[in-house]
Image (tube, rainbow, N blue to C red):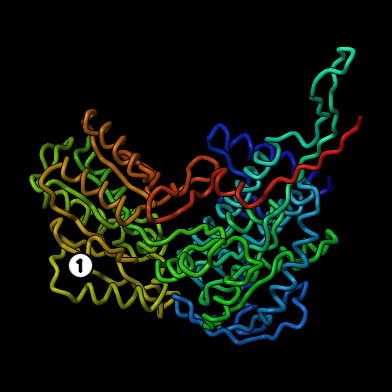
Amino acid sequence: MSDLYEKHKEKLSKAREAIKNRKEWSAYPEMPSEKHYGEGAKQKGEDDFHALLGGTYKFKVPMQDAEYVQCNATSPYGIDMGMQYPKLDKTILLERSQQAQREWRKLDYQTRFGICMEMLERLSQQSFLMAHSIMHTTGQPYMMSFQAGSPHALERGLETIAYAANAIESTAPTVEWNKVTGKDKEGKLISVKMNKTFKTRGKGVGVMIGCATFPTWNGYPGLFASLSTGNSVIVKPADKAILPLAITVDIMREVLQEANISPDVVQIAIANGDRAYTQDIVQDDSIKMIDFTGGNTFGDWLKKNTDGVQLYLEQAGLNNILIESTDNFRAMTSNIAFSLSLYSGQMCTAPQNIYIPKDGIETNDGHKSFDEVAGGIASAVEKLLGDDKRAFALLGALNSEDVDKRVNESANSDKTFVLGMQTVNYDAFPDAKTAKPQLIKVTQNDVEIYEEQFGPIAYVIATEDAQNSLKLVCDSIEQHGAMTTSLYSKEEEFKNKAMDDISDAGSPLSVNLTGMVYVNQSNAYSDFHGSGLNPAANVCLTDLGFVAPRFGWVTVREQTN
């Protein structure tokens, strides 16, 4: 047991209690206040970020023999993010991961937990630096960049360590074993006595492939699940979102060296557009697990080309809203408007398809026609984003040229718009690529609604009736996958049936959200992110099944009589 474990064991104990009772709890302050992070922390984080731009990112604990390569990128807000990062030859990278793995997996689990907890603590201290790095690599708005990029991501990392502790401590480490095997000639019992020890061992090198939109929030669960269970990890960032994970690996390597552990337990792999570099790494025989969040193209390639490797995949899906009725029409439309607008619809949990009966719904304001419901949502979006400063705080910027192209092609099509696309002007970032949500009126037979339109594009879909809506939603979940589903109904019989059917289809479900909680949000220790029960993801972040397969048990027994 290490001093670091003693330092952090109370926090780990609270995390373990939280994943058991599922009540609200947090370990890392989510508000960007210097009350929590220290006087001057906010300005220092911003200054440190700007000091990195255009330069060479040198790790405090270098990756020896790495060649610095220029990685050119432009922030979605228009800032030049070109920097040099260390890139190792893939053969050397893999060899060092294997070597470090042998040392790391032999440590007692409490020592590993202490080191991982210290990594989280050090990362928390750099939350303002992380916020700016997330904002300008992903396009997230600032508050989201701070919260999702640092404290909320750290909570998910801690959550996996808590599950690792539960998995490992579910079994006694040693036992004095005694079994009666028969009787001797005098009738006395014959027994065999043994001392048994049960040891855990990590399965091998893991690769965490970062996504372009949420590199830390989606990345930390797999990263810390692998580390805490005794596996070394190669971190491969998305080409446009390298900086957040470079900062992460830098801090982790420093903590490892201070603990007299090989820093190569965690390394970074800079592909810089070289797809073969990544493919060769993940196909190496030493790789035993891969965590990937991203599009279907590479996810499907991994499925076909990495036989025998444990894959933890979150891919594209279609998130639906089913509206049957409501007892608070204004609050419902406001809540939906916020969900459609947050980060310009570029979240894996953002809703896209809104199913409404063609004859309308019953509300607290009387019957509303289909067009009135669709118009109410559109009006709520316009009101929410009518002020550019508020729009800046919610929309952020479009993450990539692909998203920008998609939303502009949609906006210039001959579709029937309830709400057409508009851009926003950000005074501080005049070159930012922006777009308010489009709301498009369609029928259930329109093909495009059954494909993910990543970005601020949503559809209001006229259905025969609420029962038809429910069938379409469940069919969509089973065929196309969903990370979230939202239901609005004040009719108990329909609501209960919908809750049963949607749950059975395998999608997380939110019911009658009208306040300050949104379908996009997933809370650590309480909400399971995804389910692993539909095509959008083959895993659930985070549960015991996400963590436990990363290690195995070895029984050592010695006869003592």
Q: Is residue 322 left or right of residue 519?
A: left
Question: Residue 528's spot in the image, x, y percent?
Answer: 48, 44
Q: Quadrant of residue 365?
A: top left
Nearer-the-camera pick, 101 or 26: 101
Q: Which residue is depicted at the point 60% across and 74% down?
A: 281
Seen as rendered, the residue at the extreme top is 187
SS at badge 1 = loop
Q: Is residue 259 left or right of residue 47?
A: right
The C terminus, quarter of image: top right
Question: Residue 188's spot in the image, x, y percent?
Answer: 87, 14
Nearer-the-camera pick, 61 or 207: 207
Question: Residue 530's spot in the image, x, y percent?
Answer: 44, 49
Q: Which residue is depicted at the point 37% across and 48% down?
A: 519
Where is 408 relative to 288, above or below? Answer: below
The amino acid type, in three-letter code, at marker 1 is Gly
Crowd rating for badge 1 (residues with CA inside 10 Å; few <14, some 14–19, many 20+) = some
Question: Residue 313's spot in the image, x, y percent?
Answer: 48, 59
Q: Which residue is depicted at the point 75% across and 33% down?
A: 172
Q: Is residue 363 left or right of residue 397?
A: left
Q: Which residue is mark 1?
A: 420
